[in-house]
Image (spheres, coloured by chain):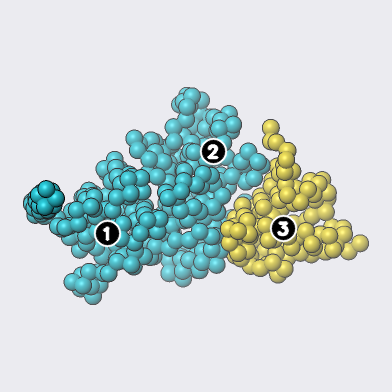
Chain colours: A cyan, B yellow
Amino acid sequence: MRVVRRAERRLRRVRAVVARRTYAVGRGIHFDPVLEREQIILPTQMSFSDNRDATVDVLILLRETALKRRRSVMLHFADVERIDADVALVLVSEIYRIRNLRSPRSVTGTYPRQRTVYEQLRAMGFYRLLSVAEHPDLSPERSGPTSRVYLPFLTGNRVEAELVDLFVTGVEENLFAMNEVARGRLVAAIIEAMNNTLDHAHPVVIAGETMTHRWWLSSWVDIATRAITVMLFDQGVGIPATLDPSLYERIRAALQDVIGLRSISLRPSDGEMILAATELHRTGTGQSGRGKGFLNMKRFVDACDSGELKVLSNRGRYSYLDGTESHDEASCSIGGTVIEWRFRHEGKMEMADE
Amino acid sequence: MSEQVFSIAERFGKYAGPRFKKQGAHSGEALRGVLVKFLEANAGVVTIVLDGTRGMGSSFLDEAFGGLVRTEGKSRNDLMRRLRFQSRIDPSYIETIIDSIERAVPEGQLVH
């Protein structure tokens, strides 16, 4: 009887492997013989701006499969044709979290077929940070001229003032000079964004799911336009969830100042909450709030030839572009907060000491 | 009584980091500790020189100066009487500090 059961089990395994191999060959994806691993196929366009729902869905699937259901995961990059830098930042942080909270083998993946995607991820330090070997046939020497220069991902759980200063020195030496006011405000704004991750992002810790007080930083320069983008991500509860509900009237008042009475809903959306957070300079305990940091960022953008401040937090999206603020809300949460800051300037940047 | 000068860059350092010590080096909380000692050792008016640092965030300044009221229990009026601020490069730091002191609420009291 036992022999029969064992034979049946073996037959089921063989059938499952055959089915999986057929599926993999049919889709042109890597065949993964490990049956226990959940297979997650990443969308061709991984973008928060142009394919947000599919991109967020796959991040949620990864998080829930690996952290809540405790299953190992194989991520299929084969079909990915585009991955925006902010998505890569969120994805690498997610893989890092899962590997640290579970085991290094709990998430693995395939290389992208698109050389440009592979090269971008390599340049961003995706493989190095995750201790994944770089593809032997796709060495950097063989790739063509690049249109972007990336700063490899950085992560930490403390505010690194000297590191930020070094980064700003790099901007000064390679992109544009700044007077002391501008330089000081750029340093202060990045430090403030890091500090907010530590001050506000993790009021509650869920065992096995939270890596507290950790920020993720990346940056890239578009060589043609000489625009620099700085991105900071945290996996916290999100800006809308950290605004004290007792401040609701202040939030509404702040919203009234910015967008007028007409469009204020009774229950603010995540987009409206981010907008309000950029205006609130104090918390309920009298400490300075996030608004000062955002104000610094907006002032810096205003002083540049062109620039944008973008915030994605939970389901909300906020943008400050050419002095105009806009916001909206998506159906799913990105699971944290991305602050993305892009600016470009020709010549020496002079900020007034107003 | 002669006026004392406290330069943040010289007495504390040119880098300004996070709010609290546990969050990293060069914190506002650490500066507050140095400041408290200086204020206790030097009676009378103290001029705080803000120039010379590499850039200070509002959380850092808030914890250093607002924290004098919130955590150290100093009186707002006494601080406003004793402290002078000098920032030739970026006077917005002075605005942030004064705002922090004026709005700080001593621990245990609620904000209305």
Determine whether label 1 and label 3 are within 8 Å by CB: no
- Front disc: 1 or 3: 1
> According to the image, label 2 marks what residue?
A243
Q: In this orientation, which residue lies closer to the viewer: A40 or A349?
A: A40
Furthest toward the right, the residue is B1
Circles 2 and 1 on the same chain: yes
> According to the image, label 3 marks what residue?
B32
Furthest toward the bottom, the residue is A141
Q: Amino acid at mark 3?
A: Arg
Name the subunit of mark 1: A
Determine whether label 3 and label 2 are within 8 Å by CB: no
**Quadrant in the picture for residue A83:** bottom left
Q: Secondary structure at mark 2?
A: loop
Q: Vertical placement of A216 versus A288: above or below?
A: below
Q: Secondary structure at mark 1?
A: strand
> According to the image, label 1 marks what residue?
A108
Name the subunit of mark 3: B
Q: Residue at x 26, y 65 (%)?
A: A119
First of labels 2, 1 by sequence position? 1
Q: Position of residue A41 (x, y in %)?
A: 21, 50
**CA gap, disc 2 and disc 1:** 37 Å
- Side of A78 relative to A176 (left or right): left
Q: Amino acid at mark 2?
A: Leu
